[in-house]
Image (spheres, grey):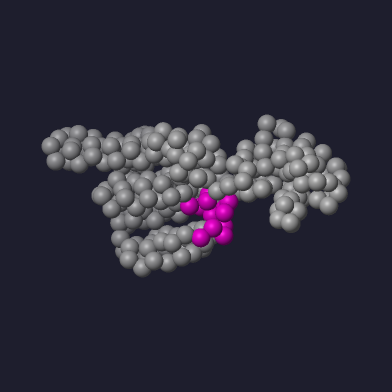
Amino acid sequence: MLEDRDYMRQPEYEDSYSRRFRWSATMILLVTYAAVFIAELVCGRYFPAANRFFYEYLALSKNGIFHGYVWQFVTYQFMHAGVLHLIFNGWAIYTFGRELEQLLGVRRFLTLLLTSGVVGGVFQISVALVWPHLFGGWVVGASAGAFGLVAAYAAMFPNREFTMLVMYIIPVTMTAQKLLIFSAVLAVAGIVFPIDNMANAAHLGGMAMGWFFVKKIMQREWSAPEGTLRVFEKKEARKAVAEPEEEDAASFLQNQVDPILEKISAHGLNSLTKREREILEAARKKIGRP
């Protein structure tokens, strides 16, 4: 059956992926966040000088950037202000990061996460320059990168559904696209009407970068990775594709469906052309017949 092929299944974290899971970039990141947070707690309790170093040199701040501490755009992403802050950011990265890492590969996944955090930091500093009395403090947390993952996931799987807790207690089910829109509206509202200590501008910047990464950077790569897929798609467009009735199921799968499935495995569903999607649908119908 078509659905039995490895690259047509949803990621199965209990089997093949679980064998690599403990060493995945997503898990390494989560462990790193926890380790840095423990170091923050220990320093805050027993080593005040080290704690000042954390916040003066590693947390993101307008003054730090003015002093040339540009590394803060990266280091602030590994610090957190409290246990709940760490848990919710970790949950978001765990939820969306596992599948994105598998689909994009480790290098692209880390690039997506970290650049979303960097762009989010730039957004936050920019807002702090405009309203220094409202947004002039230290910024820590991986939330900008996490929202970048949410945006990237929504761009790739807009209709995938998730259940989230509103106000931490009310379960609400929504699609990834609606989750992104909801998050963006909250971020904009938080910038316009700041009533808490959330870095809403960083959240918004992370979302913008995550969306841009998939829609512009990855779409360009999917359309012509290593200069080969454009040629492949032109050949496919010129080649007359036989309908399933004109050949047996085994030949149809081998000759026409397998190359498409390999393309999905290598570059994701968004890399498919309209004609390739039609071929997959025809294959499903043929194989589903008695």
Question: Residue 219, located in which quarter of the rendered image?
Answer: top right
Q: Is residue 234 above or below residue 172?
A: above
Farthest residue, direction front: 290
The residue depicted at 73 percent of the width and 33 percent of the height is: 228
x and y percentages locating residue 162 in the rendered image: 47, 59
Looking at the image, residue 136 sits to the left or right of residue 286; the answer is left
Q: Is residue 261 visible?
A: yes
Please count the marks in the image.
Answer: 0
Question: Is residue 155 on the magenta stretch?
Answer: yes
x and y percentages locating residue 36 in the rendered image: 28, 37
Question: Is residue 127 on the magenta stretch?
Answer: no
Q: Is residue 193 above or below residue 259?
A: below
Looking at the image, residue 47 sits to the left or right of residue 233; the answer is left
Farthest residue, direction left: 46
Q: Is residue 205 above or below residue 51?
A: below
The residue depicted at 74 percent of the width and 57 percent of the height is: 289
* Image quarter of the C terminus: bottom right
Front residue (pair 103, 181): 103
Front residue (pair 16, 136): 16
Looking at the image, residue 105 sits to the left or right of residue 34; the answer is right
The residue depicted at 49 percent of the width and 64 percent of the height is: 174
Please provide the residue range marked out in magenta: 150-161
x and y percentages locating residue 56 in the rendered image: 26, 38
Front residue (pair 19, 169): 19
